[in-house]
Image: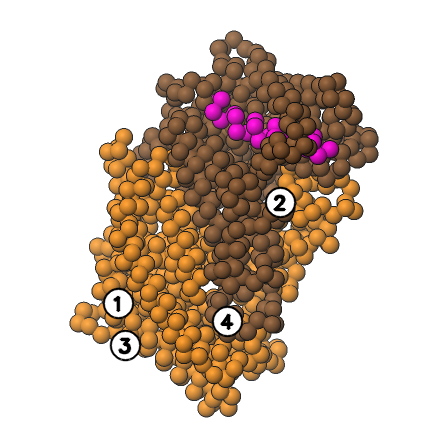
Chain colours: A orange, B brown
Amino acid sequence: MLVLPSSTPLLSTALETAPLAPDGTLVLLGVLLTLAVIYLASKVGGEICARINLPPVLGELVGGVLVGVSVLHLVVFPDSGQPSLLLDLLGQTAGLSPEMAPAVFAAQSEVINVLSEIGVIILLFEIGLESDLNELIRVGPQAAVVACVGVAVPFAAGTLGLMALFQMAAIPAIFAGAALTATSIGITAKVLSELGRLNTREGQIIVGAAILDDILGIIVLAVVTALAKTGEVRLDTIGILIAAAATFLVGAILLGRLLSPFLVQLMDRLKTRGNILVPAVLLALVMGYVGQVIHLEAILGSFAAGIILGETDKREELFNQITPLADLVVPIFFVCVGAQTDLSVLNPANPTNREGLIIALFLLTVGILGKVITGLAVFGQEPVNRLAIGIGMIPRGEVGLVFAGVGSASGALSNALNAAIIVMVIATTFLAPPLLRVAFGGDRPPGNSTANPPDDAAVAAVANLTAAAEDS
Amino acid sequence: MLVLPSSTPLLSTALETAPLAPDGTLVLLGVLLTLAVIYLASKVGGEICARINLPPVLGELVGGVLVGVSVLHLVVFPDSGQPSLLLDLLGQTAGLSPEMAPAVFAAQSEVINVLSEIGVIILLFEIGLESDLNELIRVGPQAAVVACVGVAVPFAAGTLGLMALFQMAAIPAIFAGAALTATSIGITAKVLSELGRLNTREGQIIVGAAILDDILGIIVLAVVTALAKTGEVRLDTIGILIAAAATFLVGAILLGRLLSPFLVQLMDRLKTRGNILVPAVLLALVMGYVGQVIHLEAILGSFAAGIILGETDKREELFNQITPLADLVVPIFFVCVGAQTDLSVLNPANPTNREGLIIALFLLTVGILGKVITGLAVFGQEPVNRLAIGIGMIPRGEVGLVFAGVGSASGALSNALNAAIIVMVIATTFLAPPLLRVAFGGDRPPGNSTANPPDDAAVAAVANLTAAAEDS
């Protein structure tokens, strides 16, 4: 909370802000408004998509675009350099002064950013909870091959193609190639969950590969950034990253299996409300923290936490309780991804965009084909939907945008190339959900018990009820 | 998100922050750590209290004190001027530089502040959902009398007592008297809910009176602040406040009753996840916004939203879904209230504190007696537990701290008086939960269906299940 500006008359300050500290109230009001817009956008978008047989998450992304920096300017962030209409509304309704506006805007955006990050942390926790560890281990080698092919092929094809076809220098070409590597696990996993395909063989290969892809992507980013900065790559840093990632994922799951019985025992002995949910979320937060601190990502930690707890007999109950929470925080993430997508790079009236759009077309082709062929790399005797696996790896989402952002900051990218990367990220992100639905044939798989979330919830409710009845 | 400091080597920045923007990651890490500490404190405190037959919320408050500014310095806020140990941990584990520490500290605290506010908004939504509108209307006149007596008596006794016994000037005495008026509805309602007494006649009188008290408190604050600043009171401002409060509460509930069938219809027609919860929370956020903007409080708006939805047939289902959310956000509020409580004002080694403690003893006596006698003001023929009603009005909580804060800022309060007000607030807040339990005899009332939250959840689950079975 900030100190009262001494020029403000005390009565009006007290009236406007009681019983909160001055700035706190305005920030809270900004957050409340932003959340209201986010929920409205996510529901309207999601419901429309659900009715025209598209994955609801696509609707949340599009809803985000509509309220975001590209169209309505309701949910915008300071780094876009664009004004926020919600801030104007705060000025008109809550007495936000122009002098205080930047501070309130910054603080409110920080809160929404963190809520959005918590959204994807909870999403990955839920995905981990839904995932089947044994199945993940079983498809592990296949997922690893898919991930490696899905990183190597787009990277090589993108970099060499840009150098050969567009006479680009090595460093920017490598950057663009690198931006083609990482998969946005959030979007793919959410679509898989919505299609009821998360627990199929294909679903688990995609999730496993996307997780590995995320780790590979972080390593590629480190390498490329070092190249752009100093022209050399420090192998020790990369070695540490790889070792940390492997140790973390394997260690977390082994340790988790060892310790989870004690956690379940603890949950059973707690007497106050939230006896299961609070320890579970605590575990997800702590593992998210550790994941982020060892230079990986918070979502890898919460995914591991979900996997661990999904192995226990609290799985159903926990899934039931995490669902309402996820319903409230996950849309914040997807709407914010959409809201931060600046569609103005698609405007062909701008000459830079025209050059960028041509490069983007090339990147998009490589980006789609380079991931689709990963499906062909799946070995093994059981029949799998190779096309679906390849398509599941397509969306670049926020991960690709980080490459563009870091690349821009390092000065290695031309405006056209930067725009092209952003267009590629937008297109892969928005194309993947409907394509994935088509690849899976749209229908739910027969005999998959986790197919339908509402049914699932009912099943879990029965299980809960039985457990509750037995307890009392 | 802030711009990369140009002095930072890009590789290490990329490694430490990918795939988030630089500051964003550190803020997220700070929030994750703070939340982990908050959950740990709330569970340890709550469980200990549950085992020694005290309301768990008291344990959350005490847990907050332990991790807060008074003891461990883990959850602290910038305005306390105290260092945060979690920030040091971020420096050691996540490479937070001393130069960036203040910005990260401020942003992280802003996020936790807003989450804590959202916590009390959701708490009041849940309390509204649990409340019975007809019963509230029925006890309305009694609650109004309790509220008015509970504002008038402590105010008069406190102000006149300070002037007579301590030869204090009028303005500071009036300020201290005003700080004695408002009731912290959050703490009282939470304890009532934990004791299973929320839906008793006493419970509804307390909730109704506490809501009215909150409004009266805001008006008193406006009057006192104006007095301290200009020596005069503008009646039009006060009239507007009263009119706004009355219009808002009555209008919201009337309009809500009129429109809620359409909202229920909408919920039934939504096909995506969160079809009930998201519109409900959206309503709570919007009404919270309106409540705050018309110079009342966000919690009044969310309470009204809860009341409205509690009248519909979605009540049980909604209650079921809001419970896990409340379990996660409400403790943030209580732990933060505890964490911000600075017990150093209780240290008698400091001479200012000694004078303050004597004044505090007087204020505390007036604060407790002045509210306890409100129970005597309850009229009507049915037997009610008058002592419990009086005790239910005792806790001042965060509302009282606002008076102290505004008073300090206006320069009207001496250090001793300021400390005395804080001690009074601390003592009433921490004394009320155990006293309330004693006043209610500790046991759950016979035949009260909302008595036991776990049983309640089971009942609601059955209702849900039946509804789900009928729907599908």
- Residue A376's disc is 3
- Residue B12's disc is 4
Classify mark 4: helix, strand or loop: helix
Q: Position of residue A400 (x, y in %)?
A: 47, 71
Mark whose residue sits in front, 4 or 3: 4
Q: Which residues are magenta?
A: B414-436
Q: CA distance from mark 1 to mark 3?
A: 16 Å
Which amino acid lies under the numbered mark 1 shown in the image of this protein?
A: Gly
In the image, what residue occupies the spot 56% across and 46% down?
B76
Mark whose residue sits in front, 3 or 2: 2
Classify mark 3: helix, strand or loop: helix
Between A455 and B407, the one nearer to me in the picture: B407
Chain hosting mark 2: B
Q: CA distance from mark 2 to mark 4?
A: 33 Å
Q: Which residue is mark 1?
A: A140
Q: CA distance from mark 3 to mark 2?
A: 60 Å
Q: Residues within 10 Å of mark 1 (few under 14, many from 20)?
A: some
Q: CA distance from mark 4 to mark 3?
A: 37 Å
Classify mark 2: helix, strand or loop: helix
Query: Vertically, is A182 above or below A68?
Result: below
Residue at the extreme top of the image, as rendered: B381
Q: Position of residue A340 (x, y in %)?
A: 54, 63
Query: Mark 2 or mark 4: which comes first in sequence?
Result: 4
Look at the numbered discs 1 and 2 and tell me whether their residues touch, using CB distance below 8 Å: no
User: Are the residues under badges 2 and 4 in a single subunit?
Assistant: yes
Which amino acid lies under the numbered mark 3 shown in the image of this protein?
A: Leu
